[in-house]
Image: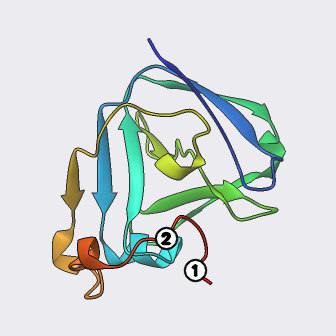
Amino acid sequence: MTDHFGSCLCGTVSFELTGDFDSFYLCHCQHCQKDTGSAHAANLFSQSAKLAWRSGADAVTSFTLPGTRHNKSFCKLCGSALPSTQIPGLLVVPAGCLDTEISMAPTAHIFSSSKAVWDEGLGDVPKFEGLPE
Protein backbone atom coordinates (compact mmCIF):
# COMPACT_ATOMS: atom_id res chain seq x y z
CA MET A 1 0.00 0.00 0.00
CA THR A 2 1.34 3.40 -1.00
CA ASP A 3 0.93 6.81 0.64
CA HIS A 4 0.84 9.99 -1.42
CA PHE A 5 0.58 13.58 -0.25
CA GLY A 6 -0.65 16.61 -2.13
CA SER A 7 -1.79 20.20 -1.83
CA CYS A 8 -3.18 23.19 -3.67
CA LEU A 9 -1.13 26.08 -5.05
CA CYS A 10 -1.79 28.45 -2.12
CA GLY A 11 -1.16 25.72 0.49
CA THR A 12 -4.55 26.06 2.19
CA VAL A 13 -5.61 22.53 1.25
CA SER A 14 -3.47 19.47 1.88
CA PHE A 15 -4.38 15.80 1.71
CA GLU A 16 -3.10 12.26 2.06
CA LEU A 17 -3.95 9.28 -0.15
CA THR A 18 -3.46 5.73 1.04
CA GLY A 19 -3.62 3.01 -1.59
CA ASP A 20 -2.73 2.39 -5.18
CA PHE A 21 -3.87 3.87 -8.47
CA ASP A 22 -5.57 1.66 -11.06
CA SER A 23 -4.96 3.87 -14.08
CA PHE A 24 -3.48 7.17 -15.22
CA TYR A 25 -5.22 8.79 -18.18
CA LEU A 26 -4.34 11.85 -20.24
CA CYS A 27 -7.80 13.02 -21.28
CA HIS A 28 -8.12 15.18 -24.38
CA CYS A 29 -11.92 15.70 -24.25
CA GLN A 30 -13.17 19.24 -24.71
CA HIS A 31 -14.43 19.37 -21.10
CA CYS A 32 -10.93 18.61 -19.75
CA GLN A 33 -9.40 21.15 -22.13
CA LYS A 34 -11.77 23.80 -20.79
CA ASP A 35 -11.33 23.04 -17.10
CA THR A 36 -7.52 22.80 -17.28
CA GLY A 37 -6.94 25.52 -19.87
CA SER A 38 -4.51 23.12 -21.50
CA ALA A 39 -4.33 20.37 -24.12
CA HIS A 40 -5.39 17.64 -21.71
CA ALA A 41 -6.03 16.67 -18.11
CA ALA A 42 -3.69 14.21 -16.38
CA ASN A 43 -5.74 12.22 -13.86
CA LEU A 44 -5.05 9.18 -11.72
CA PHE A 45 -7.96 6.86 -10.91
CA SER A 46 -8.49 4.46 -8.00
CA GLN A 47 -11.40 2.37 -6.83
CA SER A 48 -9.69 1.46 -3.55
CA ALA A 49 -7.41 4.33 -2.40
CA LYS A 50 -8.58 6.37 0.59
CA LEU A 51 -8.51 10.17 0.71
CA ALA A 52 -8.00 12.12 3.94
CA TRP A 53 -7.99 15.93 4.01
CA ARG A 54 -5.12 17.07 6.27
CA SER A 55 -6.01 20.79 6.13
CA GLY A 56 -8.40 23.13 4.37
CA ALA A 57 -11.27 20.70 3.75
CA ASP A 58 -13.66 23.64 4.06
CA ALA A 59 -11.88 25.34 1.12
CA VAL A 60 -12.60 22.42 -1.24
CA THR A 61 -15.52 22.80 -3.60
CA SER A 62 -16.59 21.01 -6.75
CA PHE A 63 -18.42 21.57 -9.99
CA THR A 64 -20.26 18.99 -12.08
CA LEU A 65 -21.11 19.98 -15.64
CA PRO A 66 -24.89 19.64 -15.92
CA GLY A 67 -26.02 16.64 -17.93
CA THR A 68 -22.59 14.92 -17.68
CA ARG A 69 -20.41 13.02 -15.20
CA HIS A 70 -17.63 15.57 -15.80
CA ASN A 71 -16.58 16.88 -12.41
CA LYS A 72 -13.79 19.02 -11.02
CA SER A 73 -12.93 19.57 -7.36
CA PHE A 74 -10.77 22.58 -6.56
CA CYS A 75 -9.58 25.03 -3.91
CA LYS A 76 -12.00 27.97 -3.53
CA LEU A 77 -9.08 30.33 -2.84
CA CYS A 78 -6.56 29.57 -5.60
CA GLY A 79 -8.54 27.40 -8.04
CA SER A 80 -6.07 24.49 -7.99
CA ALA A 81 -7.47 21.13 -9.08
CA LEU A 82 -7.88 18.66 -6.20
CA PRO A 83 -8.97 15.03 -5.76
CA SER A 84 -12.62 14.28 -6.41
CA THR A 85 -14.92 11.64 -4.96
CA GLN A 86 -18.02 12.88 -6.77
CA ILE A 87 -18.41 9.67 -8.82
CA PRO A 88 -19.42 6.93 -6.33
CA GLY A 89 -16.72 4.31 -5.87
CA LEU A 90 -14.10 6.26 -7.82
CA LEU A 91 -11.34 8.57 -6.61
CA VAL A 92 -10.02 10.89 -9.35
CA VAL A 93 -6.72 12.64 -8.56
CA PRO A 94 -5.21 15.35 -10.78
CA ALA A 95 -1.57 14.25 -11.11
CA GLY A 96 -0.28 17.82 -10.81
CA CYS A 97 -1.67 18.32 -7.30
CA LEU A 98 0.54 15.58 -5.84
CA ASP A 99 3.60 16.62 -3.84
CA THR A 100 5.02 13.10 -3.86
CA GLU A 101 6.31 11.41 -6.99
CA ILE A 102 4.36 8.67 -8.67
CA SER A 103 6.10 5.78 -10.36
CA MET A 104 3.18 5.01 -12.66
CA ALA A 105 3.46 6.13 -16.28
CA PRO A 106 0.32 7.25 -18.10
CA THR A 107 -1.86 4.28 -19.07
CA ALA A 108 -3.28 5.88 -22.21
CA HIS A 109 -4.42 9.01 -24.01
CA ILE A 110 -8.23 9.07 -24.05
CA PHE A 111 -10.70 11.06 -26.15
CA SER A 112 -7.91 11.59 -28.67
CA SER A 113 -10.51 12.44 -31.32
CA SER A 114 -10.91 15.78 -29.48
CA LYS A 115 -7.16 16.42 -29.28
CA ALA A 116 -6.19 20.10 -29.73
CA VAL A 117 -4.72 20.79 -33.17
CA TRP A 118 -1.66 22.46 -31.59
CA ASP A 119 -0.97 19.31 -29.52
CA GLU A 120 0.81 17.59 -32.43
CA GLY A 121 4.56 17.26 -32.89
CA LEU A 122 5.41 18.72 -29.48
CA GLY A 123 8.62 16.69 -29.33
CA ASP A 124 10.08 19.07 -31.92
CA VAL A 125 9.33 22.25 -29.93
CA PRO A 126 12.40 23.85 -28.23
CA LYS A 127 12.83 23.14 -24.51
CA PHE A 128 14.06 25.56 -21.82
CA GLU A 129 14.95 24.88 -18.18
CA GLY A 130 13.00 27.98 -17.13
CA LEU A 131 11.35 31.02 -18.70
CA PRO A 132 13.17 31.91 -21.94
CA GLU A 133 14.95 35.26 -22.00
Return the residue found at the far left: 113
Which quadrant, please, contains the C terminus?
A: bottom right
Judged left or right of residue 110, residue 11 is: right
Residue 29 falls in image quadrant: bottom left
The reply to whether the C-beta atoms of the residues labelled 1 and 2 are less than 8 Å apart is yes
Describe the element under mark 1 as helix, strand or loop: loop
Q: How many marks?
A: 2
- Is label 2 in a helix, a strand or a loop? loop
Residue at the far front: name it. 133
Residue 85 visible in the displayed image: yes
Outermost residue on the bottom side: it is 117
**Residue 129, image x, y percentages:** 53, 64
- Structural distance between the alpha carbons of marks 1 and 2: 6 Å
Q: Nearer the viewer, residue 47 or 114?
A: 114
Query: For the residue marked with disc 1, what is the amino acid?
Result: Pro
Query: Which residue does the image show at 22% across and 59% down from the upper left?
Result: 109
Percent x, y of residue 101: 50, 34
Which residue shows up at 45% across the image and 75% down it? 38
**Which amino acid lies under the numbered mark 2 shown in the image of this protein?**
Phe
What is the x, y in percent for residue 91? 46, 38
**Circle 2 residues within 10 Å: few <14, some 14–19, many ≥20:** few
Name the mark on residue 132: 1
Q: Quadrant of residue 55?
A: top right
What residue is at 30 percent from the left and 31 percent from the top? 22
In the displayed structure, 23 sits above or below 111; it is: above
Q: Residues within 10 Å of mark 1 (few under 14, many from 20)?
A: few
In the displayed structure image, the side of residue 103 where residue 7 appears, left or right: right
Name the quarter where the N terminus is drawn.
Answer: top left
Q: Looking at the picture, how far across and down is residue 127, in whole percent?
A: 42, 71
**Residue 67 in view in this figure:** no
Q: Is residue 58 left or right of residue 119?
A: right
Residue assigned mark 2: 128
